Amino acid sequence: MIKTSYISKTVQELKPSGIRKFFDLAANMEGVVSLGVGEPDFVTSWSAREAAINSLEMGHTSYTANAGMLELREEIAHYMKSRFHVSYDPEEEIIVTVGASQGIDIALRTILNPGEEIIVVEPCFVAYAPIVTMAGGVPVTVQALPENDFKIKAEQIEELITPKTKALFICSPNNPTGTQLGKSDLEAIAEVVIKHDLLVISDEIYAELVYDEGYTSFAAIDGILERTILLNGFSKAFAMTGWRLGFVCAPKEISQAMLKVHQYAIMCAPTMAQYAALEALQHGMSDVEDMRSSYRRRRNYIVKSFNEIGLDCHKPGGAFYAFPSIRKTGLSSQEFAERLLLEEKVAVVPGDVFGESGEGHIRCSYASSMEQLQEAIKRISRFMERFN
Ligand code: PMP
């Protein structure tokens, strides 16, 4: 008999991800159209795949430097400078990680003392608060509101700052809302961060997937670079989720501290994936452009369609999620998602799993073929007729 006490209290108390439940339900049904998954529907470019194959053929099967291959870090530094106007020293300020996910983990484990607080802007990626907790910190959540198109206001953040606040965790464009914060939004937040001497963890994994405005990196705001830990990676922009490759950029002192956690926990990111990423950065930017255009078309279609069938939907500036309101139906987001799946076989994610202000909404990933999106809209439209 395995005793519960074998498992740490912290882990016992973690709630399983609310997204999983719907995947499991949908997996046992036939004919489901899924808008549930948060990953690109593209396959990684052939040239990146070939670079990984070549690296294996050449026998590059050993560890790389802990921080990742220097050649890759140099390419990342060049990419960050040319695309986002932020300068990082490839020798000391960039670490190649196992996805942005591992970047989140090492960032939090590096900065947190027990009981210190991290302000987490919700709705957000479901991993943030649990990783804060696992790193011994306390997540303090603040709600970006639908009436502000899910843009967080600097004043809302400031109200929650206590002597224990260590950092602000922010993500733009956002999962699940698709909301992109513009330069002036970031400047207002930066002012609060500087005034209260906080760090910022800025998840910029969707930076390449913006459709209306150029992208402003948080680290590019005046005076904030030295207090920013910037997370990015290859999963979304380069359609490389399965390669598990990301990177984290931060000032030298923080990076070198993160490197200690990284080297003991995982040694280095997978070597063949690093070769693929190097090729993607060197020759893959036109593929990124093509994917961006394709997502933009699909975003336009799905947002227009939702509004036409009575699901109010703000126009998300980036990522590949629409986050329409389902309030009109009088159902909770869990009820809506469950009934939509059982009655019309469309899988979406209930908004409440991403945070309190996500209630009344559903997350629909439009990283699906146009045919699948059209079929989903047909079914959701039929479902909505029940509430007229
Ligand atoms: N941050 C956000 C906002 C995400 O949506 C995801 C993936 N769903 C991640 C981080 C993790 O990405 P990776 O595959 O690079 O670990």
Image (cartoon, rainbow, N blue to C red):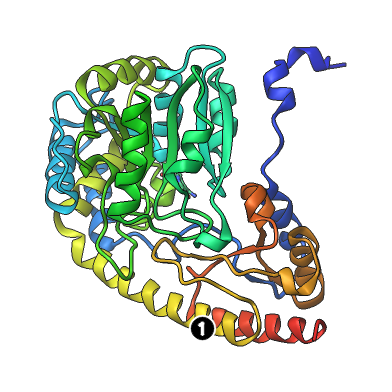
Tell me: is circle 1 under 8 Å from ligand 1.
Answer: no
Seen at 63% across and 52% down, the residue is: 357
Residue 260's spot in the image, x, y percent?
A: 33, 14
Image quarter of the N terminus: top right
Q: Residue at x 23, y 28 (%)?
A: 226
Q: Name the residue under label 1.
A: 304
Residue 145 percent location from the top left of the image: 56, 55
Horizontal and vertical percent for residue 228? 30, 32
Mark count: 1
Is 179 on the left or on the right of 347, as rendered?
Answer: left
Q: Is residue 48 left or right of residue 240?
A: left
Quadrant placement of the C terminus: bottom right
Label 1 neighbour load within 10 Å: few <14, some 14-19, many 20+ = some
- Answer whether residue 252 is visible to the viewer in this image: yes
Residue 39 percent coordinates (x, y)? 48, 58
| Depicted 211 relative to depicted 191: above or below | below
The secondary structure type at the circle numbered 1 is helix
Asked if residue 87 lies left or right of residue 68, the reply is left
Residue 288 or residue 27, whichever sits in front: 288
Q: What residue type is labelled 1?
A: Lys
Outermost residue toward the right in this view: 1
| Residue 246 in view of the camera | no
Image quarter for residue 344? bottom right
In the picture shown, does residue 115 fall above or below 321? above
Q: Residue at x 18, y 35 (%)?
A: 73
Residue 108's quadrant in the figure?
A: top left
